[in-house]
Amino acid sequence: MDQMGESLELEPLYQITVNCPQCEEDFKTSRVRPSMKRAVRRDSDFCAYYQHENPDYYVVRICPHCGFASTENSVAKLSNEQKQKYMKQIGSRVAKRDMGGKRTGEQALEAYKLALMCAQTVGDRERIVASFLHHIAWLYRYNGEIEQELRFIRYCLESYIRVFELESVSGSDAKLMYLIGELHRRLGEFNDAVKWFSRVINDQHITDSAMIRASREQWVVLREQMLSKNIDLPEEMQQ
């Protein structure tokens, strides 16, 4: 009996019941236990790698009744107009399936792409759309699909810039600014990356020490990249 209890404890997934904002039906979906969420490493744009089940695979909840995909941060209630838009553009043709159990990387990618379409269709916040795009880029990175990863990093970067312009509080969202700089760097747009890292480092209103430190670290990486490619350094990097 003790052995059975121990094996159940080690099972990384557990199920919760959620309510669909589209059809308002309850359904079950899986999550990864908090004790199993420790990342073994993270990339400079916060993409995490896990020893056990990847919790990012289970962020998106897909309703088996109507096919609507969302997360706990998505819009909680849909208006009648939003519901009609979803049914007309997606719900009438999406295949209904139960993805409440264990997911593969391929299923996680499918879930995020569906969530992205749903968010764009119902007009969810730009920050939610940007997050979906970033996660899709990470899923391609896990598979080593560099071309697709960079394609979605480009979409994600454009979306993050819109978030900064539309939603950023007083223009001092340090993590968002850092990410914009880092995604520019990953796309080889070094001068744009310099500008964003510089803003985080030099803006006296920013007090997020973790993001200031991260920006300084990536500033060094960026400088070395530019020197290795014989790219002229901007004035602020020539010291």
Image (tube, grey):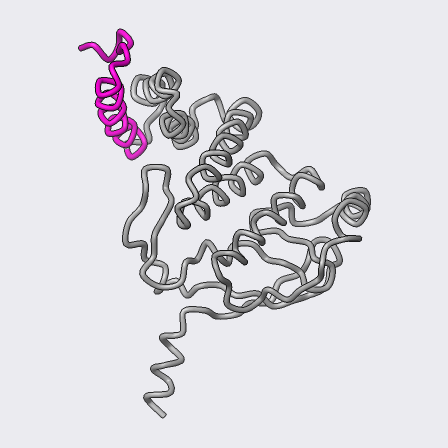
Residue 101 placement (x, y as % from top left): 54, 69
Q: Which residues are magenta?
A: 210-239
Residue 29 placement (x, y as % from top left): 57, 65
Which residue is located at x 59 percent, y 57 percent? 61
Q: Quadrant of the N terminus?
A: bottom left
Let me know if residue 238 is in the magenta part: yes
Closer to us: 55 or 152: 152
Magenta region's main secondary structure? helix
Name the outermost residue toward the left: 239
Which residue is located at x 48 percent, y 22 percent? 170
Closer to us: 45 or 110: 110
Which residue is located at x 53 percent, y 51 percent? 109
Residue 218 placement (x, y as % from top left): 27, 28
Residue 238 placement (x, y as % from top left): 20, 10
Let me know if residue 155 is in the magenta part: no
Q: Is residue 92 left or right of residue 170?
A: right
Q: Is residue 134 left or right of residue 97?
A: left
Q: Quadrant of residue 97?
A: bottom right
Name the outermost residue toward the bottom: 1
